[in-house]
Amino acid sequence: MSEASNDHPDVVVFPPLVPLAILVIAVALQRFVPLNMLAALTPTPRIVAGALIAAAGLIIVISAQRTLARRGTNMNPSQPTIAIATDGIYRSTRNPMYVGGMIALAGIALIFALDWLMALMIPAAFVLHYGIVRHEEQYLVRKFGDEYQTYMASAPRYLPFIG
């Protein structure tokens, strides 16, 4: 296999499939095995809070996409990374799309009272971390060496208080 065809992180699953899969599974579980914990909350405040949380998550994701686009690099992990994004939202987190996606999912869980979505976010976080993020980091260290390791030391993987 040529080096060019191997110039991408070897992730275990295409990243957007993780939130999509847990959303579909959560809706099915909620339909057939409802827990009704979130539904017990007063609807209007729950929905408003969920909408604000989901919007915050989407803003983070959009900001990350725009930063990557400005840098001229690929967002798709099956394609090579052209450049490292270290500015914009990437100063605060090395993985803003995953952080923003999980925040948006939490908001969606509140809006639609999907208890199962909140529960499934825990195993999804492990899949994202071990099956995607760690693979992407290994690839970026191999490709960019000291430049990426310096960036790793300056920006947290997820949030300033979550390594």
Image (tube, rainbow, N blue to C red):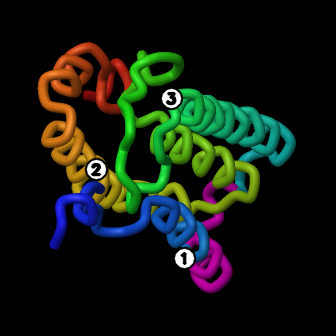
Residue extent of the magenta highlight = 26-38
Q: Residue placed at 64% from the left, 62% from the top? A: 114
Asked if 92 appears above or below 60 in the picture, the reply is above
**Residue situated furthest bottom in the rendering:** 32
Q: Residue placed at 86% from the left, 42% from the top? A: 44
Of the numbered discs 2 and 1, the one sitting upstream in the chain is 1
**Mark 1 element type:** helix
Q: Are marks 1 and 3 in contact (CB under 8 Å)?
A: no
Of the numbered discs 3 and 2, the one sitting upstream in the chain is 3
Q: Residue placed at 71% from the left, 54% from the top? A: 40
Q: Nearer the viewer, residue 96 or 105?
A: 96
- Write down the residue under mark 1: 25
Question: Could you tell me how many numbered marks the image carries?
Answer: 3
**Mark 2 element type:** helix
**Alpha-carbon span between mark 1 and mark 3:** 35 Å
- Write down the residue under mark 2: 129
Q: Please provide percent x and percent y for residue 37.
A: 61, 58
**Alpha-carbon span between mark 3 and mark 2:** 24 Å
For the C terminus, the image quarter is top left
Q: Nearer the viewer, residue 66 or 82?
A: 82
Whether the magenta-drawn stretch holds residue 46 is answered as no
Asked if 40 appears above or below 61 in the picture, the reply is below
Residue type highlighted by circle 2: His
Asked if 108 appears above or below 144 in the picture, the reply is below
